[in-house]
Image (tube, grey):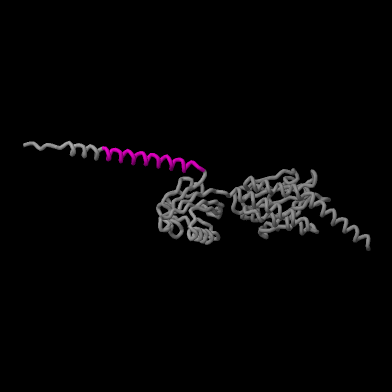
Amino acid sequence: MPKTVSNSAKNGDSRQKSYKYLSETALCNALEMAKELISVINKVPVTVFLWRPEKYWPAEFVSENIKKFEYTAEEFTSGKLLYGNIIHPDDLGMVERELSRRIEENYVDYSQEYRILTKSGEIRWVDERTFIEADENGTVKYLMGIVMDVTERKRKEKLLYIQRDLGIALSTSSSLNETLEKLLDSCLQIDEINAGGIYLIDEETGDMTLAIHLGFSPIFVEHASRYSVNSPNTKLVMIGQPVYKQHIDLLLTSRDDALRRENLRATAIIPIKSGRKVIAAFYLASSLELEFPDSVRTALETIATHFGVFISCIRLEEKLKECRNKRKF
């Protein structure tokens, strides 16, 4: 005798199929929305992290923008790298303490700035907005970080401070040597510059002499301490325009062969003028950077422009002192 199926059983099967269909549809929609969200995240100029609240913050998710720092998302999500591994060692303790304090004080989000290291070792400043997700008992389940590169802003801020402090320092300078020391010291406070010197143009002969220097080897000082008025190096400075090149490209004469061993890369030659007359020049270099950013170039040219007249005034004052002293005898 054939079995009969009740209407209620049929309706139950129909509802189960409907629920299954709706569940699958909802899951597909959720996956599509997740894909769209990840696509949007990867297009914005920030890097998004989802961290586990463990030591050095293992990452569950990293947006593709991490490539701006020369890493791949897989390096973090695979556990090969922890986020704490790329935070600058001098800032890591501060970042850890700040997170602990914010969790203890029941913050849900906060911001802080610190340095990280790219894969090639370059230092970048970042602004991180951290969101703390905790359960009803206050236990942190995960952390989300939105990390933005603010290196250029920090660089510009520092350059403004350097120029301000230099202006204050030079207002109390009483001698040419002191002025040159303060000028060079200020230039070397710029992160991208780790060697430099200031050449003075002899008013009578037109020769160019290295008056002060820091960071150069003895070989450099020996072979590059003086250039005659007719040398290619002096002529390049007397054109009166800033020059930004690789150190190797500025070795213009045979006597510069000894300087080829100098561990320098990016270089800047910045003429210092009084009116239209070139009276001195910066020679600034980096052993790390291939070229100087535009903000650094602008700062160097601004310093040179502002203080050309200042150097001329001090030189004139020193000459007047010499004349007065001679008259006394």
In front of the other: 25 or 327? 25
Residue 33 lies, with reference to residue 220, above or below; the image says above
Residue 118 pos. (x, y %): 52, 52
Q: Quadrant of residue 142?
A: bottom left
Observer able to see residue 119: no
Left or right of residue 56, residue 188 in this image: right
Measuring 43% from the left and 41% from the top, which residue is drawn there?
37
Which secondary structure type mostly characterizes the magenta part of the structure? helix
Left or right of residue 103, residue 27 in this image: left
Is residue 72 found inside the magenta-colored segment of the image? Answer: no
Observer able to see residue 182: yes
Highlighted magenta segment, given as a residue range: 18-44
Residue 44 pos. (x, y %): 50, 42
Measuring 93% from the left and 62% from the top, which residue is drawn there?
328
Measuring 80% from the left and 58% from the top, which residue is drawn there?
175
Residue 158 pos. (x, y %): 64, 52
Is residue 28 found inside the magenta-colored segment of the image? Answer: yes
Q: Quadrant of the C terminus?
A: bottom right
Residue 22 pos. (x, y %): 30, 38
Left or right of residue 152, residue 135 in this image: left
